[in-house]
Amino acid sequence: MNDLLRGEMVHLTADNPDVMAVQLFRWNQDTEWFRFLDTDPPRLFSEKKVKEFQEKELEKESSNELFFHIHTLEDDSLIGFVGLFDLFKHHGDSLVAIALGERDFWGKGYGTDAMKIMLRYAFYELNLRKVGLIVFEYNSRAIRSYEKIGFIPEGRIRGAILREGRRWDWLFMGLLREEWMGNQASRIGV
C-alpha cells in the first residue's frame, strides 16, 4: 500500500478553504444535491458566507472529525468530500459522510472508491472498531453503494424527514472492522 489515500479512481486531499468555498457555493445551488446531504430545507448562501463558514470550521480543529476532499486521478478535479465525524476514539467508533457535488461523477463508482479509501484509513490507520452512517431512505443510489462495500442495515427512524409531502426514514448502517477485513481478504483470495 504505497499511498493510503489513493484509490482506483480518486485520491483524498486537504484543500485550500478558498477553493472549497467556491465549489460548495456552486454545489449548494443544486437543491437535489443538498437534499441528499442534509435534512434542512435547501438554503442558498453567498460565496462569501460559504467561505466564512469554511474558515470557522477549520478554526475549530475538532479532534472528533477528519474530512478530506475527493479528487479524480484522471485530471485531479475536485468532485466532493468524505470524512469521519463523531469520532469516538476511546470507543473505536465513528460516523462517515460523503458527498459528490459534481453530477457527472454520480453513479459511476467514484463515491464507492472514495468510501473504500476512507474505510481503509479508518480501520488500518485509526484502528477503529466500527464505522457507521446515516442515509436518507430516498437516496437509493447511495444505499446500493454502501451495501456493495459491506455496510449492513442496523436500524431506522421512521418518518424522520418530510420531503414533497411524504415522510421518509433515516436509515442507519454500520460496518465492523472484522467485516471489512473479511471482505478485503475475500477480494484478494485469502
Image (cartoon, grey):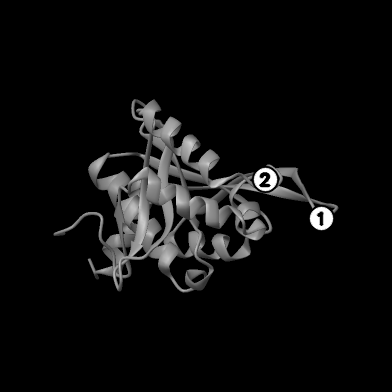
Q: In which quadrant is the C terminus drawn?
A: bottom left
Q: Please give the residue where the numbered disc 2 appears in the rendered image.
A: 43
Give above or below for 157 relative to 152. Answer: above
Give coordinates of residue 148: x percent, y percent.
Answer: 47, 65
Element carrying mark 1:
loop
**Mark nearer the N terminus (1 vs 2):** 2
Label 2 sits on what residue type?
Arg
Q: Is residue 35 left or right of residue 148?
A: right
In the figure, 30 relative to 160: above or below? below
Q: Quadrant of residue 128?
A: top left
137, 75: nearer the viewer: 75
In front: 98, or 122? 98
Q: Looking at the figure, which quarter contains the N terminus?
A: bottom left
Which mark identifies residue 94? none
User: Mark 1 or mark 2, which is nearer to you?
Assistant: 2
For the question of whether residue 54 can be seen, the reply is yes
Q: Which residue is mark 1?
A: 164
Percent coordinates x, y for residue 62 in the rendering? 38, 28
Tell me if 143 is positioned left or right of 119 in this view.
Answer: right
Q: CA distance from mark 1 to mark 2?
A: 16 Å
Instruction: Name the foreground residue: 124 vs 163.
Output: 163
Q: Vertical placement of 13 versus 130: above or below?
A: below
State the residue lying farthest toward the left.
2
SS at badge 2: loop
Residue sitting at x 28%, y 48%: 121
Question: Label 1 amino acid?
Answer: Glu
Asked whether the beta carbons under mark 1 and mark 2 sit within 8 Å of each other, the answer is no
Task: Say if residue 176 shows up in the picture.
Answer: no
Residue 47, percent from left and from top: 53, 46
Q: Residue drawn 67% across and 55% down? A: 137
Q: Residues within 10 Å of mark 1 (few under 14, many from 20)?
A: few
